[in-house]
Amino acid sequence: MRINGKCEECGDFTHPNLDRNECIADVCDGRDILNKDGTCETCGDFSYPDDSRRSCKRDTCIAADGKITTVFGKCETCGLYSKPNAEGTECVADDCEEGEILLEDGTCEMCDDYFHPDSENKVCVQDECNIRRDVWTKSGMCLTCGDYSYPDAENHECIVDTCDSETEYLQVNGTCYTCEEGTFPNAEMNGCEEPYVPPVIPPVVDPEDPVVF
């Protein structure tokens, strides 16, 4: 610029005004910083002006602590069921496969046997089964045992009692019924019966035979 007819160079962070008779600096605000030439420049994504507004800075955000760097350069903690992406710039969640639930840290975990994800895929649950007749499948669903079987102690498998065919028969509920003393299982193996006793047939008497007294 020119002062008293002489040229004078503007200092850092200033530039001549339009009349070229004064050194001025642009007024920067928001995400702008002041360049050495006295003009404003907007900080790029993932950065913001430092306190002096002379340069752009970016916070150091640790992904292991669940933090990302926002587009404004500040740290932000990911919410539940999410985690920082590989670049540390966005909160994301893993894509869970069938049988997996989404954990609070944004990763997936497979449900144990006999459990399945709830409707929101966030908790492993079991269906409410009739423990007297049902078993849980490996996927946590209910399965009713068929006739002549019943659930084992863990309700994981349908089992059948082994009966003594001479004294017991298998009931519909899968357990053995012991016949009372003096009885035995019938041919259909669905009840007990007494031994067969043939009827006593009296001898045939010829009326012409003499009667012996």
Image: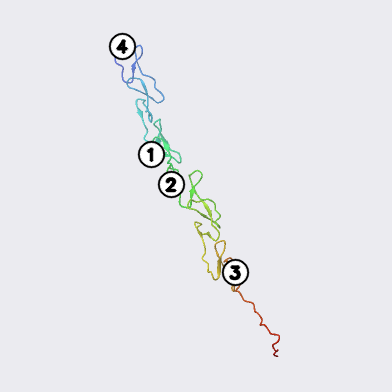
Gap between marks 3 and 2 measured at Cα: 54 Å
Q: CA distance from mark 2 to mark 1?
A: 20 Å
Mark sitting on residue 2: 4
Q: Nearer the viewer, mark 1 or mark 4?
A: 1
Dot 2 or dot 4, earlier in sequence: 4
What amino acid is at disc 3? Cys
Identified by mark 1, the residue type is Ala
On the image, numbered disc 2 is attached to which residue?
109
Viewer-nearest residue: 6 or 47: 47
| Residue 143 appears in the rendering | yes
At 39% from the left and 40% from the top, the residue drawn is: 65
Q: Is residue 164 above or below residue 69?
A: below
Residue drawn at 53 percent across, 52 percent down: 142
Q: Which mark is residue 63?
A: 1
Image marks 3 and 1: residues in contact by CB distance under 8 Å: no
Whole-number angstrom distance, CA of label 3 to CA of label 1? 74 Å
Tell me if 188 is positioned left or right of 51 in this view: right
Q: Secondary structure at mark 3?
A: strand
Q: Nearer the viewer, residue 114 or 107?
A: 114
* Local SS, label 2: strand
Where residue 110 appears, as percent x and y from the top left, is 44, 48
Tag 4: amino acid:
Arg
**Marks 2, 1: nearer the viewer:** 2
Mark 3 burial class by Cα count in 10 Å: few <14, some 14-19, many 20+:
many
Q: Residue at x 53, y 54 (%)?
A: 143
SS at mark 4 in the image: strand
**Percent x, y for residue 7?**
28, 12
